[in-house]
Amino acid sequence: KKTTALSKLMNAFCQRQGMSQQGVRFLFDGERLNGNQTPAEARRAAPLELPASSSAAPASRPPRSLALRAHSPSATPQMDMEDGDVIDVMVEQLGGAC
Amino acid sequence: MHPAALFAASWRQKRSSFDAGYGGAPPKRRKVLNSAWGFRNMLSSGGLLDDRENAASLINLRGGAMAPVPEPPAFDYDHVFRSRPAPAPASLAAAAAATASWGEAVPRTAAPACTPLGARSPAALRASGAAAAASPGFTPLPAGLARSPLAASRPSAAATSASTASASAAFAAAPAFAARTAEQRAALAAAEHRKRVDARATAAAKAVARQRIEERLRQVSLEEARQRQLGELAEDASQRCRRAVAAGEAAVRRVEALHAALLLCGAAEAEAEAEAEAQSMSEAVAAELLPAARAAVEAAEEGAGLFRVEAAGGCEGEVAAHEAALEQSRTSISLAEARLDEAEAGLAALREAAEAAAAAAEQEFFEPDADDVLDENFPPGRRRFEPRQLTEAEEARLPAPPARAAVSEILQPGNPAEKLFEINNTPITRKDIATLKPLEWLNDEVINCFVELLRQHASEAEQAGEPLPKVHIFSSLFYTKLAESPEYTYGNVRRWTKRAKVDLFSRDLVIVPINQGNTHWTLGLINLRQKRFEFIDSMHGSDGGRLAVLRRYLKDEHQDKKGAPLDLGEDWVDISYTAADGTPRQTNGFDCGMFMSRTAEYLVRDAVLDFTQADMPNLRRRMVFELSQKALTD
């Protein structure tokens, strides 16, 4: 829903994927999303649904990236987000040279 | 004298003497009357009759009764004559005056009846008798005479006889008492008549006086008119005099002006004369002075000649001195030249030394033909950047946990999930910041927050017009999303530049932090200014096909945003820097994140990549400081 904080979605995703929220980053078009934001604030209005199956989520290791797809038949046209807009879910990156 | 006048005068004289009470001798020429008078005188002296009684008796004798006194004719002269008071001595003078006036008036009335005196015709006598009867002051006797029938037909002799007869008859017949009353009555009537006559005389006198006054007034008015005329004449004369005076004054003024002009002329003449005199005098003086001046000039010429001679003598000595000095200076010049040569030689030596030193210095920083390397292979960056050490104050000044804890405190262990601060929606937790501790691997949160600071710095510098390259820095998640989800997918990042509102093709540098296998951080670089795809690895490893990914992405981005394929051709080269290129190299197994982020910082600052492994501890602390301050520091 428009006014639902994204943190609800993020929590649901992390629970389903069995990941720590601190280990994932939610991005839309390259911009970081804050859990306190709502879809309206993020300039999107369509309710988001978690994908039924996350193909890019191997059970053993956390995926490098996941995609949340929005499936909303009632997306309002004036909003940035349209059906099929994707919230990128990135996992933590580390590096220090092997 | 007129006979009537003569008659009246004589009569008057006689009457006056009679009134005065002495009976003088009667006039010779009137014998008849004299007789009457003589008779009367006799009566009165006998004491029988007074005047009045006499008269009244006479009348009574004639008429037998009291006849009313007849009114005197309306004749001006009558009453004048009769108004004389009978017994007054002053009446003489009055009678004389009246006679004078009467005498004048007589000819008017009596003239027609007048005849020559000598003729004595009865008519003339009658007329004179009538005149005598009509004359005032006349006792009624003549009137009675005139009325008597006898007197009308006879001359005066007859009248005289008649009256004499009647008088004698009355004397003889009338009783005395009756005569007396009649006489009294007659006297009263006479007195009344006299009163009336007196009033008439007074009125006449008043009229005369009025006439005289009028005449006098007339004379006065005439006099006044004359005076007025005289005054007008005098005024006219005075005006004329005034005019004359004015004219005279004007004339005087004119004369004065002329006089002044004359004076001026005289002065001018005097001046001219004085001038002429002065000129002549000056000429004389000049004539006197001229010889002296000539003498002076001659003397001066003479002196000048002498001086010239003297000067010529002195100059020769000076010239000799100058020549000597010139010789000296020439020698000194040659000495100076010699010294100059020496100095130049020394300078050349110094220059060579300096050049050698400079070349040596350059060789210390760059490999041989460093210019070419910079142009061809060396990563961009033209300046020197010396990241300073944090001061102790700064180290201590980072208070206010959790957001602004001191670096040391921030780096202390604690709840890993504690959010210390947030930059552009990216929260930095204690766990994240802990990756900046020595020996730790940096995670994407720290690196992306630092990338955010770099973006701020670059945009601020660009807005301030600083001569820095125009850069765009992607998040560390960009490359992963582009190339490893799970393979190259341009669509994953197609909208990133749109969301960031950036046109890559307007940039000089596009910096792409790359996380390699979640174990290593490297930096990809799209150098649009120099048309290069560069790969900077602190381990100097191979790019592993990542430059090809960037090349492909650039083409896709151009196709997507510009709607046209981008021909990168032969101009665009891939460069993976190696140890030979001198890019900073890590000597441990944990600082690659630091090297990568600092390389990005140096590129943003357009600085030469000359930091080393030794700078890393400071740069780690600086990064903590900068992230907590949310801004880069010097």
Image (cartoon, grey):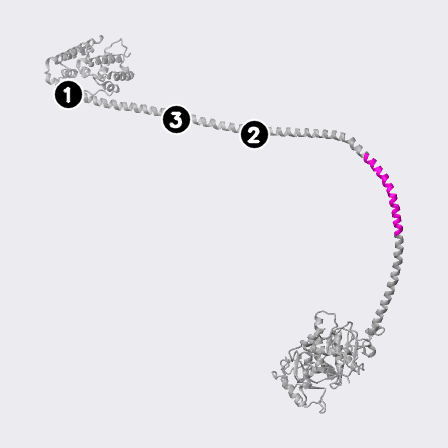
Q: Is residue B362 above or below residue A14?
A: above
Q: Which residue in the protein does label 2 denote?
A: B253
Relative image position of residue A50 (x, y in whole percent): 66, 88
Which label sits on residue B185? 1
Q: Is residue B349 above or below residue A2?
A: above
Left or right: B606, with B173 as reference point: right
Residue type at mark 3: give it: Glu
Q: Is residue A93 above or below residue B84?
A: below
In space, the residues marked 1 and 2 are separated at their CA atoms by 99 Å
Sequence-first disc among 1 and 2: 1
On the rendered image, what quadrant is the N terminus of chain A found in? bottom right
Which label sits on residue B224? 3
Relative image position of residue B602 (x, y in whole percent): 75, 75
Which label sits on residue B124? none
Relative image position of residue B21 (x, y in whole percent): 19, 13
Which secondary structure type mostly characterizes the magenta part of the structure? helix
- The reply to the same-chain question for discs 1 and 2 is yes
Q: Secondary structure at mark 2?
A: helix
